[in-house]
Amino acid sequence: MTPYSDLSPSPRTIMTPGPVEVDPRVLRALSYPILGQFDPEFTALMNETMSMLRSLFQTENRWAYPIDGTSRSGIEAVLTSLIVPGEKVLVPIYGRFGHLLHEIAERCGAEVATMEKPWGSNFDPEEIIAAIRKERPSLVAMVHGETSTGRIQPLEEVGRFCRENDVLLVVDAVATIGGVPVEADAWFLDAVIGGTQKCLSVPSGMAPITYNERAERKIIARKVIERGLRQPGQPSESSGLAGIRSNYFDLAQLQDYWSPARLNHHTEMTSMLYGLREGLRILLAEGLEARFARHRLQERALMAGLTAMGLKLYGDPSCKLPVVTCVEIPPGVDGESVRAMLLNRFGIEIASSFGPLKGRIWRIGTMGYSASMRNVLLVLGALEAALLKHGVKLPAGEGVQAALAVYEAETA
Ligand SMILES: Cc1ncc(COP(=O)(O)O)c(C=O)c1O
């Protein structure tokens, strides 16, 4: 007899800013039999995935493929392949994930200039443009949707300025892709990193990326050829010290692997690719516009419910990220105790927060498969009950009624 019980995770309603609930069709896809990574049936699935990713990122870029690893693996792959040590990089920071970009850029050997906004706000694009004029970076890296503060940063003006001034713009769209428009070509984004575990509703484990020819030129110029794969006469390192330092995250090698040449690199995560392809298929069948509208509707209903309960929404409303709603914890209430009650009594998970916001706000996600009327009504009802249990005086029943009114108005 084994001392370990059968694996049987409890059913959960996951209303965090990621990971979120996974569509059952994606879970089914994850369980299909493995194919060899050079089996033509599998390489055809790889090609289809690339084509679906182009639609997701709204781009004509040749390169759109997943990096194997969590979202930050996509960030590391892009930054390590695009930053030559010693180069100047500008990172505008308005929350925790801006600090992550700063850290990774520094590890890539960049001379990093940062600019910061207080948490809960974002940048006027003109401020970023002025900083680019002053700092003259070769690359700007910034977050599109900050899950730590629930804010979004408009990108198009900065993208246009970067393009006109030959600066590469790299964007972390981990939280926004599939829930909020991300238009790689129209906004002049040179490289974009998405996430699977949020609005795509695929488990964590792959990071879809795309990059254009401007980025590719820099990557190719830094190409390092792996020793055992070298052709006779090819140098083992063609770019000397400027060569890409990582093997796993070397986009020059990875794009060869995703190209028709299929040059061997790593062993593909077959099951994860099935899951990603199924998640993308479901997303494209729903349609990007319909999906964005669904996310906006769930956000509206959730915000109406929370405010009707007398709770205060956190942050500047003019830059609210539609897929994450931050709520101030009422004075005198132990936020972690409320979260524990939601999880243990109702099977509902909402998120706490980081850094300066720790203990001050809860963060509620309405992302992907979790962005449903059922989930929004459940979280409002359960939160109301948990707050009443914690001694908060609130108008009982109002939250759910206000959300119901939003849904009724939508279908009227
Ligand atoms: C905006 C943003 N960027 C990057 C990440 C890092 O992603 P991962 O934890 O999958 O590496 C997250 C994760 O929550 C995120 O919200």
Image: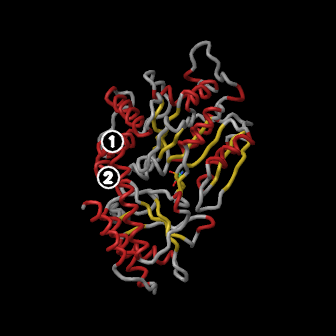
Q: Is residue 58 left or right of residue 32?
A: right
Mark 1 is on which residue type?
A: Leu
Q: Give above or below for 306 relative to 224.
A: below
Residue 201 x, y percent position in the rendering: 38, 51
Residue 129 or residue 141, whichever sits in front: 129
- The residue sitting at 43% across, 61% down in the picture is 365
Q: Give above or below for 81 relative to 119.
A: above
Q: Can see residue 109?
A: no
Give the secondary structure at mark 2.
Answer: loop
Residue 282: quadrant of the picture: top left
- The residue sitting at 36% across, 59% down in the picture is 297
Give the secondary structure at mark 1.
Answer: helix
Q: Can see residue 173?
A: yes
Q: Give above or below for 87 relative to 125.
A: above
Residue 5 x, y percent position in the rendering: 34, 64
Crowding at mark 2 (Cα within 10 Å: few <14, some 14-19, many 20+): some
Mark 2 is on which residue type?
A: Asp
Crowding at mark 1 (Cα within 10 Å: few <14, some 14-19, many 20+): some
The disc, 2 or 1, on the residue closer to the chain's N-terminal end is 2
Classify the position of the C terminus by image quarter. Answer: bottom left
Residue 147 x, y percent position in the rendering: 52, 57
Residue at mark 2? 23
Classify the position of the N terminus by image quarter. Answer: bottom left
- The residue sitting at 48% across, 30% down in the picture is 63
Residue 223: quadrant of the picture: top right
Q: Nearer the viewer, mark 2 or mark 1?
A: 1
Residue 39 x, y percent position in the rendering: 34, 27
Residue 181 or residue 39, whichever sits in front: 181
The answer as to whether callout 2 falls within 8 Å of ligand 1 is no
> Residue most toward the top?
233
For the residues labelled 2 and 1, the Cα–Cα distance comes to: 14 Å
Residue at mark 1? 284
